[in-house]
Every structure is written in C-alpha cells, then in structure tokens.
Image (cartoon, rainbow, N blue to C red):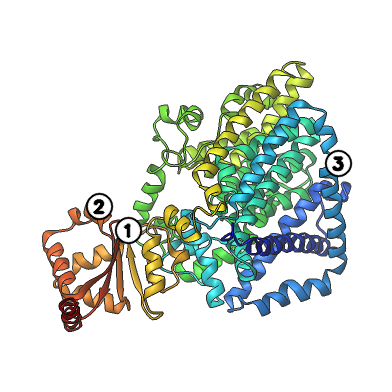
C-alpha cells in the first residue's frame, strides 16, 4: 500500500467537507437576505429538507463566485482564500455556528436510526447492502480518474482554469462552452487538493439525491418504505457506477429532484415561494447541463394545462417560473452568446448558428448522439425499452449502462396507483414525459437518472397504497424490492472487481500501470510528458480522451478529432501546403492512431490527397515513438530531417 497516498485522499476529503459546510452557511445566509420562504421552510425549522436546500443554494452561489473570479483571471489561492475564507468568517459567523450544530444534529439522528432499522429484517439487509455500496463507491473515489468525459472536459477544463487563472473556453473543444456550475466546484477541489475531491463531490451529490427521495416519500409513506426506495435508487447500476466518477449527472439529478419536490409542494399548497424555489432549482440544473431543458419544458407545460386554479394570475405564474428557471443559467448562456452567438452552443445550430462550428458537424453530432446509443427509434424499439434496459444493459453499447429491474418490475404497481393523488399523478406524468423525450433523443442510461429519481418517489407511493389501502403485499413486495436491490448490488461488485481496485490497493499495479491499463493511449501521453519540450505542441488525431493527463501543449478537437486534418490534406495541392497548415497552428508534433486511421480515414480520402500526405510524411515527418498502433511524429523541414537522418545513420555505424 506504499503507493497509495492516503494523505492525498484526506486532503481531498477535507476540501470537500469544508465546501459542504460553506455551502450550507452560504445558502442559509442568502435565503435570510432575500427573505424567501415556502411552507417547507417556514413550518419545518431545522428540518433535513431545509438543511439540504441551504446546501443546494450555497453550492450554486460558490460556483457562481468561482466563475466570476475566473472571468477576471482570479482562479488562485489568494483570491479564493479571501472569497471563501475571510468573507464567510466576517459575514456568516452566525450561519457557521448554526450549520455546525445542525450537522451534528443530523449525523446524530442518522446514527440513532440504527435501532429502528435493526428491528426490521428487510431494512437491515437493505441497509447492509447500501452500506456496502457506499463503501465500494467511496473506495473507487480514491482511484486515479480514467473516465472518458472526465478526462476530456469535466476535469481537464478545471485543471486548465487552475493553471491559467482564467475560465476561458477552447474553440477546438466545444464541451468547454457547456454550462459548468459543477466544474467550478471541481476547480475549487483541484486548486486546494486534487482530483479525488471532484470524485468525492459527485459521490456526495448521489447521497443528496437519495436523501431527497427518502424525505419526499417519508412525508406520506413512513421511514421503512422511504428508506427502501432511496436505496433502490442509489443501487441502480448506472447511478452507483458513476457516483465515483468526476461527472455531473448526479448533480443534475439532485437539483432536478429538488425542483420536483418544491414543484409538488406548489401543486399541493399553491404557494408562490415553493414555485420560485422549484424554478430556481431548474435554473441551477440548467447551469449544470442542457438536459435540464427537458424538466423545464415538462413543468412549464404542466403549469399551462394542469395548474389553472392558483392564487397567482394566469400570466404571473408562468413569468415567475420561467424567470426563476433562466436567471441562474444566464452567466453561461450570456457567455455563449457573446463568444459564439448561440446561447445553447453547439446545439440548435440551424436556429442560432455558432462560431467555430458548421452545419455538417452539427448534423453529424446530432445523428451520433441519437444513433450511437439504444436499439433504434422504431415503435417496437421504443415500446420494448423498459425490458431492453434490463435485459440488454451493460457498460458499453447499447445504452452505456444499466438501470436494473426495479422500474420495470414495479411499473404495473405504479400505473395502478398513480392517479390516486394529485402530487403523485404529477410525478408520474413528469416521469412518463421525461422517459418519452429521452427515448427519442440520446438513449444513454445516465441521462435517464432524473426519471429514475422521480419514479422512485412514485414507487414509494405505490407501495404505501398497497400496504394501507389494499392491505396487500406487505411481505412479498418488500422482499421483491430487496431482491432487485441485491441484483443491482451485484453489478457494483462486478464493476469493483473489473476496476482492479483491490490489485491497486495491494500494490500489484502502480498508479502509472493503472492509468496505462485503463486509458487507451496513456503510454503515448506519458512519453510526451517526459520527452517533449514545454514549447512543443502536439496535434492529436484518433487518440481519445487523454487531455487531463497531457502536461504539454496540445491541439485536439472534441468528438471529430480528424476534422481539421482531413480538411487540410483534402484541400492541399502539394505537401508544402500541409506543412504550412502545421506551421500556422504552431504544431511541432503529430500523434495519430494509425490503426484507426487505416480503417476509418485513409480509405475515404481521394488518391491524389493521400499521395500528397504520403509525400508530406516522407519529407517532413520523423517517427519518434510508437505504441499499440499509435505513432508520434516530429514535424520539421526537409533540411532538418535529412540532417537528423545523417546523424542517426552515423550513430548506427559507430555502434
């Protein structure tokens, strides 16, 4: 275990704990300042719901401050110590003390709940399984990040912000124009600790989501059903698997379920404060990921057709909700308008256009998102989704993850009980609408997480309806749910084994070996980091997600890595034109997955262009390194190349 830096992980944990406490104090202070209240806040003082809402608001405000600091080049420890150390100490002293005491209180309540859990055999088994899941996911948080999107932008971009001090997008990486509220929190973690902090934050958002599900169900069904349904959500294979990744999907899911919680409160109480909070949570979700537009659209349509009898005027209701749902995302949308002309860049290109992008790539990307996942959009494929998501789910294709059997098995129960209560009817309609929108777009399992969270609450109502109204299923249904949780837990254990976590901790695999084994082309990146100069610049084609680990300057286009390369060699009339393009981009080295190019690129290039490229390679490229079908070339003039060849031949003769 000598290679495991426990001090490193403890530093990350300390940064995350501080951020959690700071968010709670900040959110509490902000809500006091704006004097915003709802039935949930005004009548349930010191409640868990209130505590979670404070954190939700606080996380967003901290993220917003980080973004504003980054706009002016203020991503550094001195500025952050002032913003997140000195200012809170001066202006949030009372809130800090209250947060400390509330945190102790809720931790005590969690430990005190052990006695009631132990009296119920099913709850005891479910709690043991959930604890095992938490432990496995927490251990996975200590591993080096190897996940595709984390290396491409969720961690890569915050690392750049820490390095440069500025929050600036990269034109060649369109992901850098996505809203980045969660990535701002990751920036805090990277600045004061390391990438383990980002993993732990995402892990924590998963716990918060399960907590909101528990609290929503507990209000009408009691603690036993609430705990079972919360564990059922957390055990969903895709939710459990990504909880130890530096992604943003569980943060999105948390703000979505919180929005639904307060929207359902508005449906029940017709309270303006609840509607404002629901809209605000939607807006924060939009500042995390564009996928939140699904939720905003569904809730707006529900307001339009279902909520006609409220104390608010017909128009005022929509204005309040839409304003609250847009304002939190305005900084990111405005930045995109200024830099690209498209608030939702790179999407909706046909409507808004956008710099650094074009119609062909916009269409290709849309088709790729739609067709790369799932089993098609035919009526038969759509209708069979509830079953295929269980029977054909795995880490890769077709859904890039699984959701387990819970939602499919209990669907008849939900259908039977969904119309009995207005709040649950709303959640069921939301779940059905979200699932339909997901089914006709990109069918990635993790994009379905907001549906799974809402459906878990519907499941709680369905179980409660059977137990109390029909007086049936009190033994069979909990056992069936427990079996589903056990089935889901087996996925987590399988992933834990595949991840070679124990080998890593036992010292059988070093950190470098672990990265090389789990990240394609990491060996080539390690060579670049060790051997190239700081003023070099490497152009990467068919290399995949490696950007976070590359410490030397590089140029790599997101998704369509070969785009500029293909355009350059296709339009070049002679080898020197290709050289001029490389010089124009200040590129000194070229890293390409030759095996991939032989299959997916070279056969589709015209013979004349391919001949020009072959001449360019012969005249101006020298191979420096090769590994697993990937080759690193040095770009140089013909005279320099001839000189290097003479030296190389002389050394060979001498030896």
Q: Tell me: 185 left or right of 601.
A: right
On the image, the x and y values in percent for residue 587 come to 31, 75
Alpha carbon distance from label 1 to label 2: 10 Å
Tag 1 secondary structure:
loop
Q: Tell me: 28 left or right of 14.
A: right
> Which mark is first along the chain, 2 or 1?
1
Residue 320 in view (yes/no): yes
Q: Residue, x 67% and y 30% (percent of image)?
A: 459
On the image, the x and y values in percent for residue 186 come to 60, 63
Asked which quadrant contains residue 14, the reply is bottom right
Asked if labels 2 and 1 touch by Cβ distance under 8 angstroms, the answer is: yes
Q: Pointer 2: what residue?
A: 600
Sort mark 2 into few (<14), some (14-19) or many (20+) by Cα contacts within 10 Å.
few
On the image, the x and y values in percent for residue 420 come to 72, 25
Frontmost residue, 126 versus 63:
126
Extreme residue toward the front, this view: 655
Q: Pointer 1: what residue?
A: 542
Asked which quadrant contains residue 551, the reply is bottom left
On the image, the x and y values in percent for residue 643 come to 18, 83
Location of the C terminus (image quadrant): bottom left
Tag 3 secondary structure:
helix
Q: Residue, x 55% and y 75% (percent of image)?
A: 166
> Which mark is first along the chain, 1 or 3?
3
Alpha carbon distance from label 3 to label 1: 54 Å
Q: Tell me: 632 left or right of 157.
A: left
Name above or below for residue 550 compared with residue 492. Answer: below
Q: Pointer 3: what residue?
A: 112
Sort mark 1 into few (<14), some (14-19) or many (20+) by Cα contacts within 10 Å.
many
Alpha carbon distance from label 3 to label 2: 60 Å
Sort mark 3 into few (<14), some (14-19) or many (20+) by Cα contacts within 10 Å.
few
């Amino acid at each position: 275990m000598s290679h495991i830096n426990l001090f490193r992980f403890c530093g990350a944990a300390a940064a995350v704990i501080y951020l959690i406490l700071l968010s709670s104090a900040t959110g509490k202070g902000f809500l006091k300042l704006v004097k915003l209240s709802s039935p949930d806040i005004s009548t349930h003082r010191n409640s868990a719901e209130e505590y979670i809402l404070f954190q939700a608001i606080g996380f967003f405000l901290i993220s917003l401050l980080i973004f504003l600091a980054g706009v002016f080049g203020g991503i550094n420890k001195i500025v952050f110590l002032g913003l997140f150390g000195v200012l809170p100490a001066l202006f949030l002293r009372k809130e800090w003390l209250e947060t400390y005491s509330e945190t102790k209180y809720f931790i005590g309540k969690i430990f005190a709940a052990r006695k009631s859990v132990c009296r119920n055999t099913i709850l005891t088994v479910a709690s043991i399984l959930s604890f095992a899941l938490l432990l496995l996911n927490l251990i996975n948080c200590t591993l080096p990040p190897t996940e595709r999107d984390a290396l491409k932008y969720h961690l890569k971009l915050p690392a750049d912000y820490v390095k440069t001090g500025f929050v600036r997008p990269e034109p060649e990486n369109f992901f850098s124009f996505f809203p980045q509220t969660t990535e701002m929190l990751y920036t805090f973690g990277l600045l004061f600790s390391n990438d383990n902090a980002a993993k732990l934050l995402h892990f924590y958002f998963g716990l918060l989501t399960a907590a909101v599900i528990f609290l929503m169900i507990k209000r009408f069904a009691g603690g036993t059903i609430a705990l079972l349904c919360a564990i059922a959500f957390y055990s969903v294979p895709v939710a459990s698997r990504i909880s130890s990744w530096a992604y943003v999907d569980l943060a999105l899911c948390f703000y979505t379920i919180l929005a639904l919680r307060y929207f359902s409160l508005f449906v029940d109480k017709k309270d303006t404060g609840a509607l404002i909070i629901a809209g605000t949570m939607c807006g924060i979700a939009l500042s995390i990921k564009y996928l939140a537009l699904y939720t905003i659209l569904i809730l707006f349509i529900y307001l339009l057709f279902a909520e006609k009898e409220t104390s608010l005027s017909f128009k005022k209701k929509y204005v309040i909700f839409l304003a609250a749902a847009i304002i939190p995302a305005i900084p990111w949308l405005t930045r995109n308008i200024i830099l690209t002309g498209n608030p939702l860049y790179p999407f909706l290109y046909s409507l808004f256009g956008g710099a650094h992008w074009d119609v062909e790539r916009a269409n290709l990307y849309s088709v790729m998102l739609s067709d790369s996942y799932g089993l098609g959009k035919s009526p038969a494929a759509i209708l069979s989704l509830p079953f295929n998501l269980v029977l054909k789910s795995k880490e890769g294709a077709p859904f890039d993850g699984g959701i387990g059997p819970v939602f499919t098995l209990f669907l008849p129960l939900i259908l039977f009980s969904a119309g009995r209560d207005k709040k649950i009817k709303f959640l069921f309609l939301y779940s059905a609408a979200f699932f339909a929108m997901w089914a006709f777009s990109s069918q990635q399992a993790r994009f379905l997480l907001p549906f799974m969270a809402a459906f878990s609450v519907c499941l709680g109502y369905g179980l409660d309806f059977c137990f109390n109204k029909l007086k049936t299923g009190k033994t069979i249904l909990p056992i069936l749910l427990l079996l589903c949780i056990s089935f889901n837990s087996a996925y987590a254990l399988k992933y834990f084994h595949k991840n070679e976590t124990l080998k890593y901790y036992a010292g059988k695999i070093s950190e470098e070996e672990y990265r090389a084994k789990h990240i394609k082309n990491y060996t080539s990146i390690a060579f670049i980091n060790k051997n190239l100069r700081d003023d070099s610049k490497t152009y990467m084609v068919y290399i995949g997600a490696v950007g976070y680990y590359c410490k030397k300057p590089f140029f790599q286009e997101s998704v369509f890595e070969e785009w500029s390369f293909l355009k350059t060699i296709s339009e070049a009339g002679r080898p020197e034109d290709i050289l001029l393009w490389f010089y124009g981009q200040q590129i000194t080295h070229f890293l390409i997955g030759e095996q991939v190019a032989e299959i997916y690129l070279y056969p589709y290039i015209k013979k004349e262009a391919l001949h020009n490229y072959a001449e360019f390679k012969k005249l101006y490229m020298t191979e420096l390194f090769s590994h697993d079908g990937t080759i690193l070339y040095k770009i140089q003039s013909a005279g320099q190349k001839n000189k290097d060849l003479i030296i190389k031949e002389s050394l060979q003769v001498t030896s």
